[in-house]
Amino acid sequence: MKKKLIFLLCFFCLSTYVQAQRLYLDGYVVTNAGDTLKGKIDNKNWVQTPQLIRFSSPALGEIDYKVDDIQGFGITNEVVFVRKKTDLDVSPYALSKLLTTAERIIVKDTTLLLRQIVKGRLSLFYTKDKQEKNHYFIQKFDEPVAELVDHHFLKTIDGRQFNAHWDLYNQQLLQLCQDCSLYEGKAFKYSFDESTLTSLILAYNRFFGDNKPTIASKKEKFKMNFCLKAGVSSYAYQVDSYDYYATRFEKSGLIAYSIGGGLLTELPSFRRKLGFSLDVLYTVYKEGLALNANYLPMTNKSYLGLYLTPAYSLYKNIPKQLDMFVEAGASIEVPLNKLNNNFFEEGMGAMYGYTFGVGCKVKRMRVSLDYYTNNAGLQIFVKIGGNINRWGLNVSYALGK
């Protein structure tokens, strides 16, 4: 049974890895001629500006587009990239690398595919460079795109160096938004982020009658879903007695069933790499532990377990349709029934242990192959110890949006 499960695990990992290499999603490209070609886009989870776009359609086949070949592209209902020519501020932002002058390092007339956050009277764009520095760009109507400048540098006063801040972005925003009577001038005193900047741009656009300004790219937020979960597993137990002489009792090839629910959370990040699941499962073991009829009868079969399992994504695409992950966590299982009412022969009590496994998430469905190892919960008998090991195939379905 164990060999079959290991074979299934290897096959599962290999097939999921192959699928993850290319994931085509519904989308489009806009050619330099202004034509919109609909088809499939190979999603690459672009954090920095894309350099190559792989497009596929039944009529054209598979085509690779470079930045200069298209005006932009999008993945339906998820993200939009638009080609823009602009100046890029590449001045260092890490404290250990700050310049000692207010002069900035500017790369002139750089052509980039920028992620479009808001489209309207005022449009907002974003990219991240190789230094992991965030760049936000703003455009009014069809005027040139300009980067919002948030410049930090080292300033020396009386022989001491200070981290100086030049908030040029406030002057830029004032110049762009002065035609709006609601704009108060200095919008951000020290800094801004995508959320606060997006709110400002949306409010400006609505002031001029755009009640539904387009939010072209979605920002990931903290997410929590309730899940239903069920599983089947193959387990073996091993019990050692150290009374007068060492004796080992073991049995394998047994079956256990689990059913329950839990919470699945994903921490917001540029690719949602880290998540946690907290599950409560009712597990029935096909048979309890048994040494022999004279010493320790069969004990508890049904348990209520609590499992806390962090999961790390090996691959994740933008709309979260396909995700391969590894997970490892801790568990505790509490007995619900007793097959023997004699306190001194009760045997298996609460069990604690750990688990690890691999899995695949496709939209709302998660399938995982997990290994569990628990102590046998033989606390009453100080001269008896043991453990239960099991391989389980688990399926969960997320409710809600």
Image (tube, rainbow, N blue to C red):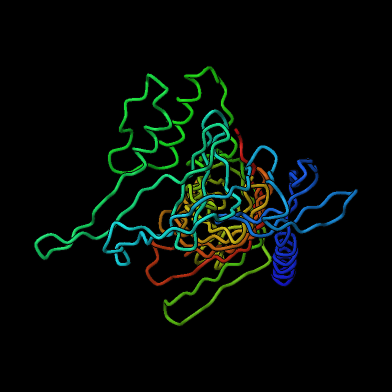
Q: Is residue 337 at least partly visible in the picture?
A: no
Q: Residue at x 57, y 50 (%)?
A: 85
Q: Residue 354 or 122: which is nearer the viewer?
A: 122
Judged from this view, the residue extending furthest toward the right is 59
Q: Position of residue 148 (x, y in %)?
A: 42, 44
| Above or below, comparing residue 239 to residue 232 in the picture | below
Q: Position of residue 194 (x, y in %)?
A: 45, 41
Q: Residue 324 or 207: which is nearer the viewer?
A: 207
Q: Position of residue 64 (x, y in %)?
A: 76, 59
Residue 368, by quadrant, is bottom right
Position of the N terminus by quadrant:
bottom right
Q: Residue 331 or 135: which is nearer the viewer?
A: 135
Residue 3, by quadrant, is bottom right
Q: Residue at x 51, y 67 (%)?
A: 387
Q: Residue at x 45, y 59 (%)?
A: 132
Image-based side of 157 in relation to 273, left or right: left
